[in-house]
Image (cartoon, coloured by chain):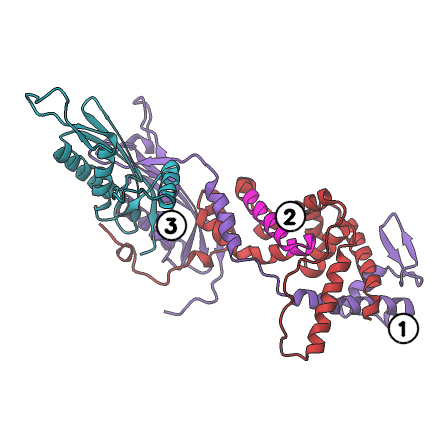
Chain colours: A red, B cyan, C purple
Amino acid sequence: MTDASTVEGSDTVVAAEELDDLTLVVRAQEGDTRAFEILVRRHQRPLYRLAVRLLDNRSDAEDALQEAFVAAWRRLGGFRGEATFSSWMYRIVTNRCLKLLRRRRPVTTLEDLGDPPGPDGASPEHSAERQDRAAALQRALQNLSIDQRACWILRELHGLSYEDIAAIVGASPDAVRGRLHRARCNLAEVMTPWR
Amino acid sequence: MTSFTTPSDGAPTHPQLRVSDTVVARVAAYHACRVPGVLRLRPNLAQSMASIATRLFPPRDGEHRMPTDGVTAVVEDGHAEIAIALITRWGHNCRDIAEQVQSQVTEQIHSYTGLPATVTITITEVSYDD
Amino acid sequence: MAVNGTRPQHDVALLACGRDAATVWERAVAGRTSAHDRSCPHCQAVADDQRLLATAVAALVEEAVEPPPSLTERVMGAVLAELRPSHYLPLPTRHGHARIDRVTAAGVLRHAVAQMSALRVRSCQIHLIEPSRSGDTSGDDASAESALGSPMVRIDISVTARFGADLLSATARVRQMILAAAEDLLGLPVATVDVEVVDVFEDPARRPH
Protein backbone atom coordinates (compact mmCIF):
# COMPACT_ATOMS: atom_id res chain seq x y z
CA MET A 1 0.00 0.00 0.00
CA THR A 2 1.32 3.40 -0.93
CA ASP A 3 0.34 6.72 0.40
CA ALA A 4 0.41 10.05 -1.34
CA SER A 5 3.74 11.15 0.02
CA THR A 6 5.65 8.16 -1.29
CA VAL A 7 4.25 8.42 -4.79
CA GLU A 8 6.24 11.56 -5.33
CA GLY A 9 8.13 13.69 -2.92
CA SER A 10 8.07 17.03 -4.64
CA ASP A 11 7.23 20.66 -4.54
CA THR A 12 3.99 22.36 -3.74
CA VAL A 13 0.61 20.81 -4.32
CA VAL A 14 -1.38 22.71 -6.91
CA ALA A 15 -4.79 23.08 -5.37
CA ALA A 16 -7.57 22.48 -7.85
CA GLU A 17 -8.79 25.99 -7.00
CA GLU A 18 -5.69 27.41 -8.67
CA LEU A 19 -6.12 25.61 -11.96
CA ASP A 20 -6.99 27.48 -15.13
CA ASP A 21 -10.54 27.49 -16.46
CA LEU A 22 -9.85 25.31 -19.46
CA THR A 23 -8.29 22.56 -17.35
CA LEU A 24 -11.29 22.65 -15.04
CA VAL A 25 -13.67 22.60 -18.01
CA VAL A 26 -11.95 19.54 -19.50
CA ARG A 27 -12.09 17.80 -16.14
CA ALA A 28 -15.76 18.67 -15.77
CA GLN A 29 -16.38 17.39 -19.29
CA GLU A 30 -14.86 14.12 -18.16
CA GLY A 31 -17.38 13.95 -15.33
CA ASP A 32 -15.49 15.65 -12.50
CA THR A 33 -18.23 17.49 -10.60
CA ARG A 34 -15.71 19.03 -8.20
CA ALA A 35 -13.99 20.80 -11.08
CA PHE A 36 -17.36 22.15 -12.16
CA GLU A 37 -18.07 23.36 -8.65
CA ILE A 38 -14.86 25.39 -8.68
CA LEU A 39 -15.94 26.97 -11.97
CA VAL A 40 -19.31 27.84 -10.47
CA ARG A 41 -17.70 29.44 -7.41
CA ARG A 42 -15.20 31.30 -9.55
CA HIS A 43 -17.68 32.79 -12.01
CA GLN A 44 -20.93 33.18 -10.11
CA ARG A 45 -20.28 36.68 -8.78
CA PRO A 46 -20.20 38.71 -12.02
CA LEU A 47 -22.86 36.48 -13.55
CA TYR A 48 -25.14 37.03 -10.59
CA ARG A 49 -24.65 40.78 -10.84
CA LEU A 50 -25.46 40.59 -14.53
CA ALA A 51 -28.68 38.69 -13.85
CA VAL A 52 -29.70 41.05 -11.03
CA ARG A 53 -29.22 44.11 -13.24
CA LEU A 54 -31.03 42.55 -16.18
CA LEU A 55 -33.95 41.15 -14.21
CA ASP A 56 -34.05 43.77 -11.45
CA ASN A 57 -34.98 41.07 -8.99
CA ARG A 58 -32.65 39.02 -6.82
CA SER A 59 -34.66 35.88 -6.47
CA ASP A 60 -35.37 35.72 -10.22
CA ALA A 61 -31.65 36.29 -10.77
CA GLU A 62 -30.79 33.40 -8.48
CA ASP A 63 -33.17 31.09 -10.29
CA ALA A 64 -31.90 32.19 -13.69
CA LEU A 65 -28.31 31.67 -12.65
CA GLN A 66 -28.98 28.24 -11.23
CA GLU A 67 -30.76 27.19 -14.42
CA ALA A 68 -27.93 28.64 -16.51
CA PHE A 69 -25.27 26.68 -14.62
CA VAL A 70 -27.22 23.44 -14.83
CA ALA A 71 -27.76 24.04 -18.55
CA ALA A 72 -24.01 24.65 -18.85
CA TRP A 73 -23.26 21.37 -17.11
CA ARG A 74 -25.53 19.54 -19.54
CA ARG A 75 -24.06 21.27 -22.58
CA LEU A 76 -20.47 21.14 -21.42
CA GLY A 77 -19.69 18.45 -23.98
CA GLY A 78 -20.33 21.02 -26.71
CA PHE A 79 -17.87 23.52 -25.26
CA ARG A 80 -14.82 23.37 -27.48
CA GLY A 81 -12.77 26.17 -26.03
CA GLU A 82 -13.13 28.57 -28.97
CA ALA A 83 -14.54 31.06 -26.44
CA THR A 84 -13.50 31.43 -22.83
CA PHE A 85 -15.64 29.71 -20.24
CA SER A 86 -16.52 33.14 -18.89
CA SER A 87 -17.91 34.48 -22.16
CA TRP A 88 -19.66 31.18 -22.80
CA MET A 89 -21.40 31.56 -19.42
CA TYR A 90 -22.19 35.21 -20.12
CA ARG A 91 -24.00 34.08 -23.23
CA ILE A 92 -26.00 31.41 -21.43
CA VAL A 93 -26.95 33.70 -18.54
CA THR A 94 -27.84 36.65 -20.79
CA ASN A 95 -30.00 34.53 -23.04
CA ARG A 96 -31.70 32.92 -20.07
CA CYS A 97 -32.50 36.37 -18.65
CA LEU A 98 -33.65 37.81 -21.98
CA LYS A 99 -36.00 34.88 -22.42
CA LEU A 100 -37.46 35.53 -18.97
CA LEU A 101 -37.82 39.25 -19.68
CA ARG A 102 -39.60 38.67 -22.97
CA ARG A 103 -41.98 36.30 -21.25
CA ARG A 104 -42.49 38.73 -18.38
CA ARG A 105 -43.63 41.52 -20.74
CA PRO A 106 -45.35 44.21 -18.72
CA VAL A 107 -42.41 45.35 -16.68
CA THR A 108 -42.85 44.26 -13.09
CA THR A 109 -42.02 46.06 -9.88
CA LEU A 110 -38.93 48.15 -9.72
CA GLU A 111 -37.36 47.44 -6.41
CA ASP A 112 -36.14 44.22 -5.07
CA LEU A 113 -32.57 45.17 -4.59
CA GLY A 114 -32.45 44.40 -0.89
CA ASP A 115 -30.67 46.47 1.67
CA PRO A 116 -28.59 49.35 0.39
CA PRO A 117 -24.95 49.25 1.46
CA GLY A 118 -24.08 50.87 4.77
CA PRO A 119 -22.19 54.11 5.15
CA ASP A 120 -18.61 53.69 3.99
CA GLY A 121 -16.89 56.45 5.94
CA ALA A 122 -18.00 59.18 3.59
CA SER A 123 -20.40 61.79 4.87
CA PRO A 124 -23.93 60.40 5.28
CA GLU A 125 -25.37 62.84 2.76
CA HIS A 126 -22.77 61.89 0.24
CA SER A 127 -23.29 58.13 0.49
CA ALA A 128 -27.07 58.51 0.59
CA GLU A 129 -26.84 60.61 -2.51
CA ARG A 130 -24.79 57.96 -4.28
CA GLN A 131 -27.30 55.31 -3.31
CA ASP A 132 -30.15 57.37 -4.64
CA ARG A 133 -28.26 57.96 -7.83
CA ALA A 134 -27.61 54.23 -8.23
CA ALA A 135 -31.26 53.46 -7.53
CA ALA A 136 -32.37 56.04 -10.10
CA LEU A 137 -30.10 54.50 -12.71
CA GLN A 138 -31.30 50.99 -11.93
CA ARG A 139 -34.87 52.23 -12.31
CA ALA A 140 -34.04 53.99 -15.56
CA LEU A 141 -32.53 50.77 -16.89
CA GLN A 142 -35.87 49.03 -16.59
CA ASN A 143 -37.39 51.50 -19.02
CA LEU A 144 -34.95 50.62 -21.77
CA SER A 145 -35.86 48.08 -24.37
CA ILE A 146 -34.61 44.63 -23.44
CA ASP A 147 -31.97 44.65 -26.18
CA GLN A 148 -30.65 48.09 -25.24
CA ARG A 149 -30.58 47.15 -21.60
CA ALA A 150 -28.56 43.98 -22.26
CA CYS A 151 -26.01 45.79 -24.43
CA TRP A 152 -25.65 48.64 -21.97
CA ILE A 153 -25.20 46.39 -18.92
CA LEU A 154 -22.67 44.12 -20.65
CA ARG A 155 -20.66 47.13 -21.79
CA GLU A 156 -20.89 49.59 -18.89
CA LEU A 157 -21.13 47.29 -15.90
CA HIS A 158 -19.11 44.32 -17.21
CA GLY A 159 -16.71 46.02 -19.58
CA LEU A 160 -17.15 43.55 -22.44
CA SER A 161 -16.01 44.45 -25.96
CA TYR A 162 -18.48 45.11 -28.79
CA GLU A 163 -17.39 41.86 -30.40
CA ASP A 164 -18.04 39.86 -27.24
CA ILE A 165 -21.41 41.52 -26.72
CA ALA A 166 -22.30 40.91 -30.36
CA ALA A 167 -21.52 37.21 -29.94
CA ILE A 168 -23.54 37.03 -26.73
CA VAL A 169 -26.69 38.75 -27.96
CA GLY A 170 -26.45 37.42 -31.51
CA ALA A 171 -26.19 40.75 -33.34
CA SER A 172 -23.51 42.51 -35.37
CA PRO A 173 -20.96 44.71 -33.56
CA ASP A 174 -22.45 47.69 -35.43
CA ALA A 175 -25.92 46.90 -34.13
CA VAL A 176 -24.48 46.59 -30.63
CA ARG A 177 -22.84 49.96 -30.99
CA GLY A 178 -26.12 51.52 -32.09
CA ARG A 179 -28.11 49.97 -29.26
CA LEU A 180 -25.51 50.97 -26.75
CA HIS A 181 -25.55 54.55 -27.90
CA ARG A 182 -29.32 54.81 -27.83
CA ALA A 183 -29.31 53.27 -24.37
CA ARG A 184 -26.78 55.86 -23.20
CA CYS A 185 -28.83 58.73 -24.60
CA ASN A 186 -32.03 57.44 -23.06
CA LEU A 187 -30.39 56.96 -19.68
CA ALA A 188 -28.74 60.38 -19.77
CA GLU A 189 -32.10 61.93 -20.46
CA VAL A 190 -33.76 60.18 -17.53
CA MET A 191 -30.84 61.04 -15.27
CA THR A 192 -30.90 64.76 -16.16
CA PRO A 193 -32.30 65.81 -12.73
CA TRP A 194 -29.07 64.42 -11.22
CA ARG A 195 -26.87 66.70 -13.25
CA MET B 1 -38.62 -8.34 11.99
CA THR B 2 -37.71 -11.99 12.17
CA SER B 3 -34.07 -12.42 11.71
CA PHE B 4 -33.80 -16.10 12.07
CA THR B 5 -36.36 -18.75 11.45
CA THR B 6 -36.13 -22.42 12.03
CA PRO B 7 -38.10 -24.82 9.95
CA SER B 8 -41.56 -25.20 11.45
CA ASP B 9 -41.80 -28.94 10.88
CA GLY B 10 -40.25 -29.87 14.21
CA ALA B 11 -36.65 -30.68 14.87
CA PRO B 12 -34.79 -31.32 11.64
CA THR B 13 -32.28 -34.08 11.37
CA HIS B 14 -29.59 -31.63 10.25
CA PRO B 15 -30.19 -28.28 11.80
CA GLN B 16 -31.01 -25.90 9.03
CA LEU B 17 -30.89 -22.16 9.23
CA ARG B 18 -32.97 -19.98 6.97
CA VAL B 19 -31.72 -16.45 6.71
CA SER B 20 -33.36 -13.44 5.13
CA ASP B 21 -31.76 -11.09 2.61
CA THR B 22 -31.81 -8.41 5.29
CA VAL B 23 -29.73 -10.41 7.70
CA VAL B 24 -27.10 -11.05 5.08
CA ALA B 25 -27.10 -7.37 4.07
CA ARG B 26 -26.70 -6.15 7.66
CA VAL B 27 -23.90 -8.54 8.48
CA ALA B 28 -22.14 -7.75 5.20
CA ALA B 29 -22.41 -3.99 5.85
CA TYR B 30 -21.07 -4.42 9.38
CA HIS B 31 -17.94 -6.22 8.24
CA ALA B 32 -17.35 -4.23 5.06
CA CYS B 33 -17.17 -0.99 7.04
CA ARG B 34 -14.43 -2.41 9.24
CA VAL B 35 -11.97 -3.13 6.47
CA PRO B 36 -9.12 -0.61 6.61
CA GLY B 37 -9.36 1.92 3.82
CA VAL B 38 -13.14 1.81 3.65
CA LEU B 39 -14.49 5.23 4.55
CA ARG B 40 -18.15 4.27 4.37
CA LEU B 41 -20.64 2.44 2.26
CA ARG B 42 -22.44 4.26 -0.46
CA PRO B 43 -26.22 4.01 -0.39
CA ASN B 44 -28.07 4.01 -3.68
CA LEU B 45 -30.81 6.54 -4.28
CA ALA B 46 -33.65 4.43 -2.89
CA GLN B 47 -31.64 3.69 0.24
CA SER B 48 -30.87 7.37 0.73
CA MET B 49 -34.57 8.17 0.61
CA ALA B 50 -35.35 5.37 3.05
CA SER B 51 -32.71 6.53 5.48
CA ILE B 52 -34.07 10.08 5.38
CA ALA B 53 -37.49 8.65 6.16
CA THR B 54 -36.03 6.70 9.11
CA ARG B 55 -34.43 9.82 10.45
CA LEU B 56 -37.67 11.76 10.13
CA PHE B 57 -39.82 8.95 11.54
CA PRO B 58 -37.67 6.88 13.87
CA PRO B 59 -39.04 3.49 14.79
CA ARG B 60 -41.21 3.67 17.91
CA ASP B 61 -39.89 0.54 19.54
CA GLY B 62 -36.45 2.06 19.98
CA GLU B 63 -34.93 -1.01 18.47
CA HIS B 64 -31.53 -0.30 16.99
CA ARG B 65 -31.47 -1.49 13.43
CA MET B 66 -28.12 -2.06 11.86
CA PRO B 67 -27.72 -0.19 8.59
CA THR B 68 -27.78 -1.88 5.23
CA ASP B 69 -27.05 1.26 3.20
CA GLY B 70 -24.79 0.48 0.32
CA VAL B 71 -25.46 -3.25 0.38
CA THR B 72 -27.93 -5.35 -1.51
CA ALA B 73 -28.18 -9.01 -0.81
CA VAL B 74 -30.22 -11.82 -2.27
CA VAL B 75 -30.33 -15.28 -0.76
CA GLU B 76 -31.34 -17.92 -3.22
CA ASP B 77 -30.87 -21.67 -3.38
CA GLY B 78 -28.65 -21.68 -0.32
CA HIS B 79 -26.31 -19.05 -1.72
CA ALA B 80 -25.93 -15.37 -0.89
CA GLU B 81 -25.38 -12.90 -3.70
CA ILE B 82 -24.08 -9.64 -2.22
CA ALA B 83 -23.30 -6.32 -3.88
CA ILE B 84 -21.51 -3.61 -1.93
CA ALA B 85 -20.92 -0.02 -3.03
CA LEU B 86 -18.25 1.79 -1.11
CA ILE B 87 -16.23 4.95 -0.70
CA THR B 88 -12.56 4.42 0.05
CA ARG B 89 -9.88 6.59 1.56
CA TRP B 90 -7.18 8.10 -0.58
CA GLY B 91 -3.85 6.33 -0.28
CA HIS B 92 -5.25 2.81 0.01
CA ASN B 93 -5.07 0.50 -2.95
CA CYS B 94 -8.56 0.17 -4.38
CA ARG B 95 -8.09 -3.35 -5.67
CA ASP B 96 -6.67 -4.50 -2.33
CA ILE B 97 -9.57 -2.97 -0.43
CA ALA B 98 -12.06 -4.61 -2.77
CA GLU B 99 -10.33 -7.93 -2.33
CA GLN B 100 -10.22 -7.64 1.46
CA VAL B 101 -13.88 -6.70 1.65
CA GLN B 102 -14.73 -9.65 -0.55
CA SER B 103 -12.77 -12.12 1.54
CA GLN B 104 -13.84 -10.66 4.91
CA VAL B 105 -17.52 -10.57 4.02
CA THR B 106 -17.49 -14.01 2.40
CA GLU B 107 -15.81 -15.50 5.45
CA GLN B 108 -18.02 -13.74 8.01
CA ILE B 109 -21.25 -14.50 6.21
CA HIS B 110 -20.28 -18.11 6.01
CA SER B 111 -19.29 -18.41 9.64
CA TYR B 112 -22.38 -16.55 10.87
CA THR B 113 -25.03 -18.00 8.59
CA GLY B 114 -23.44 -21.00 7.02
CA LEU B 115 -24.15 -19.62 3.57
CA PRO B 116 -21.59 -19.48 0.81
CA ALA B 117 -21.50 -15.97 -0.60
CA THR B 118 -20.40 -14.15 -3.71
CA VAL B 119 -19.47 -10.52 -3.18
CA THR B 120 -19.41 -7.89 -5.92
CA ILE B 121 -17.69 -4.60 -5.08
CA THR B 122 -18.21 -1.21 -6.67
CA ILE B 123 -15.95 1.62 -5.60
CA THR B 124 -17.93 4.76 -6.37
CA GLU B 125 -15.73 7.41 -4.79
CA VAL B 126 -12.35 7.97 -3.26
CA SER B 127 -12.23 10.54 -0.47
CA TYR B 128 -9.25 12.87 -0.24
CA ASP B 129 -10.41 14.62 2.88
CA ASP B 130 -8.43 13.01 5.63
CA MET C 1 -30.39 65.89 -25.67
CA ALA C 2 -27.43 66.46 -27.89
CA VAL C 3 -28.60 64.13 -30.61
CA ASN C 4 -30.34 65.75 -33.52
CA GLY C 5 -29.86 63.54 -36.51
CA THR C 6 -29.63 59.87 -37.35
CA ARG C 7 -28.32 57.77 -40.13
CA PRO C 8 -30.64 54.82 -40.00
CA GLN C 9 -28.47 52.73 -42.28
CA HIS C 10 -25.60 52.90 -39.80
CA ASP C 11 -27.68 52.81 -36.71
CA VAL C 12 -25.69 55.63 -35.07
CA ALA C 13 -26.55 59.22 -34.37
CA LEU C 14 -24.79 62.19 -35.96
CA LEU C 15 -24.41 65.44 -34.07
CA ALA C 16 -25.26 68.82 -35.55
CA CYS C 17 -21.52 69.35 -36.05
CA GLY C 18 -21.41 66.20 -38.19
CA ARG C 19 -19.53 64.08 -35.65
CA ASP C 20 -20.67 60.60 -34.80
CA ALA C 21 -22.16 60.87 -31.30
CA ALA C 22 -21.12 57.35 -30.30
CA THR C 23 -17.50 58.05 -31.24
CA VAL C 24 -17.48 61.31 -29.32
CA TRP C 25 -18.88 59.45 -26.32
CA GLU C 26 -16.18 56.76 -26.54
CA ARG C 27 -13.48 59.44 -26.73
CA ALA C 28 -14.92 61.10 -23.64
CA VAL C 29 -14.84 57.74 -21.84
CA ALA C 30 -11.22 57.22 -22.81
CA GLY C 31 -10.31 60.81 -21.89
CA ARG C 32 -8.96 61.39 -25.41
CA THR C 33 -11.04 64.35 -26.51
CA SER C 34 -9.95 66.32 -29.55
CA ALA C 35 -9.65 70.11 -29.74
CA HIS C 36 -12.96 70.15 -31.61
CA ASP C 37 -14.66 68.05 -28.93
CA ARG C 38 -13.62 70.53 -26.27
CA SER C 39 -14.80 73.60 -28.16
CA CYS C 40 -17.94 72.29 -29.90
CA PRO C 41 -21.12 72.76 -27.81
CA HIS C 42 -22.71 69.61 -29.28
CA CYS C 43 -19.71 67.50 -28.44
CA GLN C 44 -19.55 69.15 -25.01
CA ALA C 45 -23.15 68.12 -24.35
CA VAL C 46 -22.25 64.51 -25.17
CA ALA C 47 -19.29 64.69 -22.79
CA ASP C 48 -21.56 66.11 -20.07
CA ASP C 49 -24.00 63.23 -20.53
CA GLN C 50 -21.12 60.78 -20.36
CA ARG C 51 -19.88 62.29 -17.07
CA LEU C 52 -23.37 62.30 -15.63
CA LEU C 53 -23.84 58.62 -16.36
CA ALA C 54 -20.32 57.68 -15.30
CA THR C 55 -21.03 58.94 -11.77
CA ALA C 56 -24.25 56.97 -11.57
CA VAL C 57 -22.57 53.87 -13.04
CA ALA C 58 -19.83 54.07 -10.42
CA ALA C 59 -22.49 54.26 -7.71
CA LEU C 60 -24.29 51.25 -9.21
CA VAL C 61 -21.11 49.19 -9.48
CA GLU C 62 -20.31 49.98 -5.84
CA GLU C 63 -23.56 48.46 -4.62
CA ALA C 64 -23.12 45.21 -2.77
CA VAL C 65 -24.74 42.64 -5.01
CA GLU C 66 -23.40 39.30 -3.89
CA PRO C 67 -24.74 35.88 -4.78
CA PRO C 68 -26.16 34.12 -1.72
CA PRO C 69 -23.82 31.44 -0.33
CA SER C 70 -26.51 28.84 -0.99
CA LEU C 71 -26.30 29.34 -4.74
CA THR C 72 -23.37 27.00 -5.33
CA GLU C 73 -25.04 24.34 -3.21
CA ARG C 74 -28.26 24.66 -5.17
CA VAL C 75 -26.41 24.39 -8.48
CA MET C 76 -24.34 21.42 -7.36
CA GLY C 77 -27.38 19.72 -5.87
CA ALA C 78 -29.09 19.93 -9.25
CA VAL C 79 -25.93 18.82 -11.07
CA LEU C 80 -25.41 15.81 -8.84
CA ALA C 81 -29.06 14.84 -9.19
CA GLU C 82 -28.64 14.61 -12.96
CA LEU C 83 -28.59 10.95 -13.67
CA ARG C 84 -25.71 10.06 -15.88
CA PRO C 85 -24.77 6.57 -16.88
CA SER C 86 -21.80 5.45 -14.81
CA HIS C 87 -18.92 3.67 -16.43
CA TYR C 88 -16.74 1.28 -14.55
CA LEU C 89 -13.36 -0.29 -14.84
CA PRO C 90 -12.90 -3.85 -13.60
CA LEU C 91 -10.51 -4.33 -10.70
CA PRO C 92 -8.72 -7.68 -10.84
CA THR C 93 -9.50 -9.32 -7.50
CA ARG C 94 -9.19 -13.00 -6.77
CA HIS C 95 -12.75 -13.59 -5.58
CA GLY C 96 -15.82 -12.22 -7.25
CA HIS C 97 -16.22 -9.13 -9.37
CA ALA C 98 -14.94 -5.72 -8.38
CA ARG C 99 -15.00 -2.45 -10.25
CA ILE C 100 -14.29 1.21 -9.79
CA ASP C 101 -16.08 4.21 -11.21
CA ARG C 102 -14.11 5.51 -14.18
CA VAL C 103 -14.35 9.21 -13.20
CA THR C 104 -13.25 8.36 -9.66
CA ALA C 105 -10.28 6.37 -10.94
CA ALA C 106 -9.19 9.26 -13.17
CA GLY C 107 -9.51 11.59 -10.18
CA VAL C 108 -7.13 9.39 -8.17
CA LEU C 109 -4.51 9.58 -10.91
CA ARG C 110 -4.86 13.37 -11.17
CA HIS C 111 -4.58 13.73 -7.43
CA ALA C 112 -1.45 11.61 -7.42
CA VAL C 113 0.36 14.01 -9.74
CA ALA C 114 -1.08 17.23 -8.31
CA GLN C 115 2.20 17.84 -6.49
CA MET C 116 4.13 18.21 -9.72
CA SER C 117 4.87 21.87 -10.17
CA ALA C 118 6.07 21.51 -13.76
CA LEU C 119 2.89 19.96 -15.13
CA ARG C 120 -0.86 20.12 -14.65
CA VAL C 121 -3.06 17.35 -15.86
CA ARG C 122 -5.89 18.55 -18.01
CA SER C 123 -7.54 15.50 -19.56
CA CYS C 124 -7.17 12.05 -18.00
CA GLN C 125 -8.97 9.19 -19.64
CA ILE C 126 -8.69 5.56 -18.73
CA HIS C 127 -9.67 3.19 -21.51
CA LEU C 128 -10.26 -0.47 -21.08
CA ILE C 129 -8.42 -2.46 -23.67
CA GLU C 130 -10.79 -5.17 -24.73
CA PRO C 131 -9.02 -8.50 -24.82
CA SER C 132 -8.62 -9.53 -28.42
CA ARG C 133 -11.11 -12.14 -29.44
CA SER C 134 -9.03 -13.76 -32.14
CA GLY C 135 -5.31 -14.26 -32.13
CA ASP C 136 -4.72 -12.13 -35.19
CA THR C 137 -4.00 -8.85 -33.42
CA SER C 138 -0.40 -7.91 -33.28
CA GLY C 139 1.42 -4.97 -31.77
CA ASP C 140 0.79 -3.16 -28.49
CA ASP C 141 -2.61 -4.53 -27.66
CA ALA C 142 -1.59 -8.13 -28.08
CA SER C 143 -0.48 -8.11 -24.46
CA ALA C 144 -3.78 -6.67 -23.28
CA GLU C 145 -4.24 -9.46 -20.77
CA SER C 146 -2.19 -9.25 -17.64
CA ALA C 147 -0.75 -12.21 -15.79
CA LEU C 148 -4.02 -12.59 -13.88
CA GLY C 149 -5.89 -12.83 -17.14
CA SER C 150 -7.69 -9.57 -16.45
CA PRO C 151 -8.09 -6.81 -19.00
CA MET C 152 -5.63 -3.96 -18.96
CA VAL C 153 -6.10 -0.25 -19.39
CA ARG C 154 -4.62 2.46 -21.56
CA ILE C 155 -4.28 5.86 -19.92
CA ASP C 156 -4.34 9.00 -22.07
CA ILE C 157 -3.45 12.22 -20.34
CA SER C 158 -3.03 15.72 -21.65
CA VAL C 159 -0.97 18.16 -19.62
CA THR C 160 -0.06 21.80 -19.59
CA ALA C 161 3.57 22.47 -18.75
CA ARG C 162 5.16 25.29 -16.82
CA PHE C 163 6.97 27.43 -19.33
CA GLY C 164 10.67 26.65 -19.20
CA ALA C 165 10.25 23.19 -17.71
CA ASP C 166 12.19 20.38 -19.37
CA LEU C 167 9.36 18.78 -21.31
CA LEU C 168 11.09 15.50 -21.92
CA SER C 169 11.95 14.79 -18.32
CA ALA C 170 8.70 16.23 -16.98
CA THR C 171 6.59 14.04 -19.22
CA ALA C 172 8.74 11.02 -18.43
CA ARG C 173 8.23 11.70 -14.76
CA VAL C 174 4.49 12.18 -15.04
CA ARG C 175 4.19 8.97 -17.05
CA GLN C 176 6.09 7.08 -14.40
CA MET C 177 4.01 8.64 -11.59
CA ILE C 178 0.78 7.78 -13.37
CA LEU C 179 1.96 4.21 -13.84
CA ALA C 180 2.92 3.97 -10.17
CA ALA C 181 -0.37 5.48 -9.02
CA ALA C 182 -2.43 3.20 -11.24
CA GLU C 183 -0.69 0.17 -9.79
CA ASP C 184 -0.25 1.31 -6.16
CA LEU C 185 -3.40 3.31 -5.58
CA LEU C 186 -5.91 1.73 -7.95
CA GLY C 187 -4.55 -1.72 -8.58
CA LEU C 188 -5.25 -1.44 -12.29
CA PRO C 189 -2.94 -3.22 -14.70
CA VAL C 190 -1.72 -0.64 -17.20
CA ALA C 191 -0.69 -1.42 -20.76
CA THR C 192 0.36 2.08 -21.82
CA VAL C 193 0.36 5.69 -20.66
CA ASP C 194 0.19 8.33 -23.38
CA VAL C 195 1.14 11.87 -22.43
CA GLU C 196 0.43 14.85 -24.66
CA VAL C 197 1.59 18.37 -23.80
CA VAL C 198 -1.24 20.64 -24.98
CA ASP C 199 -0.23 24.03 -23.59
CA VAL C 200 2.28 25.89 -21.49
CA PHE C 201 1.61 28.21 -18.58
CA GLU C 202 3.60 30.85 -16.77
CA ASP C 203 4.01 30.59 -13.05
CA PRO C 204 5.42 33.89 -11.75
CA ALA C 205 4.48 33.06 -8.15
CA ARG C 206 6.63 29.96 -8.17
CA ARG C 207 8.78 29.68 -5.10
CA PRO C 208 12.53 29.35 -5.59
CA HIS C 209 14.02 26.09 -4.39
**SS at circle 1:** helix
Q: Amino acid at mark 3?
A: Arg
Left or right of B74, for residue A48: right
Q: Position of residue B7 (x, y in %)?
A: 14, 23
Q: Which mark is residue C39?
A: 1
**Closest to the observer, A52 or B96:** A52
Q: Quadrant of residue B123?
A: top left
Chain label for disc 1:
C
Left or right: where A161 falls relative to C177 = right
In which chain is the residue bearing label 3? C
Q: Residues within 10 Å of mark 3 (few under 14, many from 20)?
A: many
Magenta-colored stretch includes residue A110: no
Percent position of residue B21, x then y: 25, 30
Is residue C198 visible in this depiction of the protein?
no
**Residues at marks 3 and 1, CA–CA distance in whole angstroms:** 63 Å
Of residue C110 and residue C65, the one placed in the foreground of this image is C65
Quarter of the rendering containing residue C12? bottom right
User: Can residue A132 be seen here?
Assistant: yes
| Residue C164 to residue B119: above or below | below
The type of residue carrying mark 1 is Ser
Question: Who's the residue at 35% across and 34% down the image?
Answer: C128
Chain for disc number 2: A
Which residues, given as a range, are shown in magenta? Answer: A50-72
